[in-house]
Amino acid sequence: MSGPVTMLNAFVSPDEAEAVQLPGHCCVYGVSALLEQLLEEAVELPAMYDVDGRAGKLMDLLVAEIASMPRLSLHAPLPGDSRLARACQRLFEAPSISIGLDVMAAEVGMSRRTFTRLFRVQTGVSFAEWRQQVCLLTAIERLSGGQPVTRVALDLGYASPSAFSSAFRRVLGETPSRYMEARRAE
């Protein structure tokens, strides 16, 4: 996340999560105006609320609304393994689409196969998908700051602005310029 952020947390029991088919791993979801209001209301509730009263109904609606939200395609979770997490943190600090799997595996002292297997177990995605997510998250931040597409594309290691735009469109469904225009209009 970059810029001003407000974070509200809702803890959902495993039984409730299973009942509404929430995944068992970390995900990023869109937030509707209703969900935002429900979260703001929920933080005011006592930890031990009446599950049969208004608070219980509010929390049931909150969980149902979370379950109905779209999963966002941009998500780059850090792995729990400290070696992988340190290497990933360095990639966050200097993102590049050209940093390869073999380089990362060597950096953490693992074989390619072990790195690949452990990375997927720890993050839920392949290293290539994760690296692309990091680059696109960085790109959105830099584009939001007014940097030109060409500069962002080349700085992130893409062979050309068109290669960057193609990857951006494949993941986010729009070209970088249209994506940014839509965000500015919100």
Image (tube, rainbow, N blue to C red):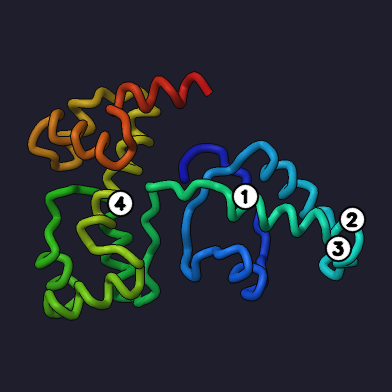
Give the spatial CA distance, label 1 vs label 3. 18 Å
Residue hosting label 2: 54
Question: Mark 2: which amino acid?
Answer: Arg
Q: Mark 1 or 2 closer to N-term?
A: 1
Tell me which numbered mark, 2 or 4, is placed earlier along the sequence: 2
For the residue marked with disc 1, what is the amino acid?
Answer: Met
Graded by Cα atoms within 10 Å as few (under 14), some (14 to 19) or many (20 or more), the crowding at tag 4 reads few
Q: Secondary structure at mark 4?
A: helix
Residues tagged 1 and 3 counted as in contact (Cβ below 8 A): no
Which of the 4 image quarters holds residue 141? top left
Q: Are marks 2 and 4 in contact (CB under 8 Å)?
A: no
Residue 65 position within the rendered picture, expressed as x and y whole percent measured from the top left: 65, 50
At 47% across and 50% down in the image, what residue appears?
71
First-in-chain label (1 vs 4): 1
Residue 55, horizontal then vertical, whole percent:
86, 58
Whole-angstrom CA distance, mark 1 to mark 2, is 24 Å
* Distance from Cα at disc 2 to Cα at disc 3: 12 Å
Q: Tag 1, which secondary structure?
A: loop
